[in-house]
Each structure stands twice: as structure tokens, then as C-alpha cells.
Amino acid sequence: MSENLTDELDLMKISGPPSFSDMPMETVYKIVGKVDPYSRLAVRKVCRNLRNVIDDTDPGFKYVKVDLSRYASRLWLTNIGRGAICYSRNSNDPGCTVRRTSQSKSIEKTQLDAILDDLAVIVKNPKLRLDNFVIVSSHEASKQFVEWIRDIAQSGILLHTKKIKLDIFPLKDVFGVLSHCKPGFLEDIEFYCYDSAGKMDEIINLEQWKRAKSINIEGRVCEDIPIEHFFHFSRITIKLRKLSVSDAIKIRDDLMKSAHFEYAYIKIIEGVDPDVLRAINPNYHPYDALDPFEHGNYTFRISSDKDDLALL
């Protein structure tokens, strides 16, 4: 009896505690489900089994923000400001240091390669469904980001996000990113663009543009886009150099009568012409320019400097 017990104890000492590979898969999935999204990126690198489990698990977040700054890049998996993963250049070697909270590790990759590799793990998860994807970039980084997302798309993966915000992107790279989002799933497009050259005609012909519901364009003047190309949107925020009477009539007869229209904020660089407002509402009088006025089911407001028109 005692000999058998001794043998069993010795066997337990040799075998040690159970490993993940010894656990039922249901238990492993439950454990992984309790690991925070940031830690999953590290746990995934432990072994192939854990990598497969994490890649087959709902990521557990709906928000991603990427800041591709020149000297330090950051990755957020929550819209709460703290807790981002920071990728910073090393001063004495070509690699970078990855930090989160009090932990840090130096690796041989460049900071941009490192953050994009981690981002690839996230977007390749077939269960990823984001509410918001924000990318803050620079001219150099946006080019590499577009090449990265093009490589992702070549494997048959499109980005599933309801909203995308591109901050400080050249127009050609805005096209490159939008064209690899899932048409129909993407509802809200927002971008800050510092140039006006090319690609806008290609952007407005994308299915992603045609099937979205909201547009917010900052930085550039949308004088090269026929006004009717905005009429399928429910929510519109744009800047124009001027608004013609003929375009105002289109807004009155087409946009404002559509069942899906909610609001439009239009900044007009040369100011709001009273003739434009009369085209929308024949009862408009310039003495009432700063007061809200109504037409049908909508209220109009003009800013104090008379260069902002709000259709609510």
C-alpha cells in the first residue's frame, strides 16, 4: 500500500502541474477569454496552440487607434487613453523598444514594422468587427501603411470597421485605405487631407464611398466633387469654396427630400450668398441672416461670420 502511494507521489513530482496542452480546449478558450486584449498579443507568441486559440477567439474590443508618429508609434485597443503599446526607436541600434505600463522589451524590428506586425495579428482575426478604426500618420508612414493593408487584402481579408478616421493622409493614401475596407460594413468615413491632387474621382467611385452613410472631410476644399455625389449620405460635413445657386437647388430638391437625410454642415470659404439661401427658402431675408430659419422639416443656421451653413 505504502509502496504504491510512494510511486504515485513520485509520478506526480515528475509530471508536474498540468500544462495548457493537457487541458480541455473548452477550458483553454475560457482562460484566453479572460485575458485582456493587449496581453493576448504576448500570449499568442508562447506556443502554436495558444496562437491558434487566440486567432479563433473574438478579440474582445471594438476600437483600434494607431499613431504612426516618426519617433514613437502607439497602438490603442480601447478609446480610454491609458494603456497603449508604445514602439520607440532605439538610440544606439536599428531596432526599437516596445513598452506597455511598466514592461518593456527591445527587439530588432523597426518601430513601424513592429506595430504593423502586431496590427496584422489583429485584423487577420476572422471575428474582428470594429466600431471605429483611427489612423494618425505622417506622409512617410501612410505610404507604408497602405502597402501593409494591400498585402493584408491580397490574402482575402478586408477591414471590417463601421467607422474609419484617417488623420493627416495624402489623398492617394486615403484611396488606398478605403479601397480595402469592407463595402456595406463601412458606414462612416472621416479623413483629414492636406493635399488636393488626384484620386478624388476614384474615391467617389468606390463601393465603400457609395454605400457609406456619413462623410466628414477636413483640410481640403471639395470643389472637384459634384455636389450630388454627397446626396446618398445621411450626415455630411464638408468645405466648399462657394455654393452655387444651382447646387443649392439640388440640395433643396434632392438631398433634403430624401428619407435618409439627417444633417449637413457646409463651410463656404467665400461666404454664404443670400441668393443661395433664397434658392433654398424663398422667404429668406438677409436681415435674419444670423437667426435660424425653417424650410419644410429642416432648420438652417448661418455662423456669425456667414461662412458656415448648417442644415439640421
Image: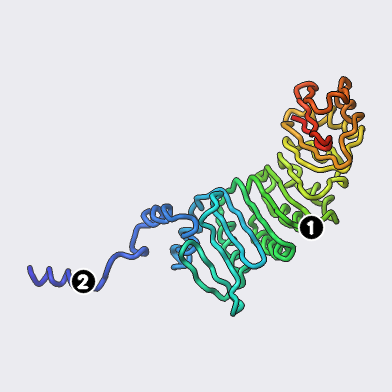
Q: Which mark is residue 162?
A: none
Q: Which residue is denoted by mark 1 in the rendering?
A: 172
Q: Would residue 298 be seen by someone viewing this image from the given angle? A: yes
Task: Looking at the picture, tell me which residue is in the foreground, 91 or 223.
Answer: 91
Callout 2: SS: helix
Please tell me whether mark 2 or mark 1 is closer to you in this view: 1
Q: Which mark is residue 11?
A: 2
Relative to 167, does residue 3 appear above or below in the rendering? below
Q: Would residue 127 be seen by someone viewing this image from the given angle? A: no
Reading the chain from its start, which is encountered first: label 2 or label 1?
2
Task: Looking at the picture, tell me which residue is in the foreground, 285 or 121.
Answer: 285
205 sits to left or right of 149: right
- The percent coordinates of residue 272 (x first, y second) are 87, 34
Where residue 235 sits, quadrant-wise, is: top right
Identified at 28% across, 66% down, the residue is: 17
Query: For mark 2, does the 10 Å Cα neighbourhood hold few (<14), some (14 to 19), or many (20 or more) residues?
Result: few
Relative to 312, does residue 46 appear above or below in the rendering? below
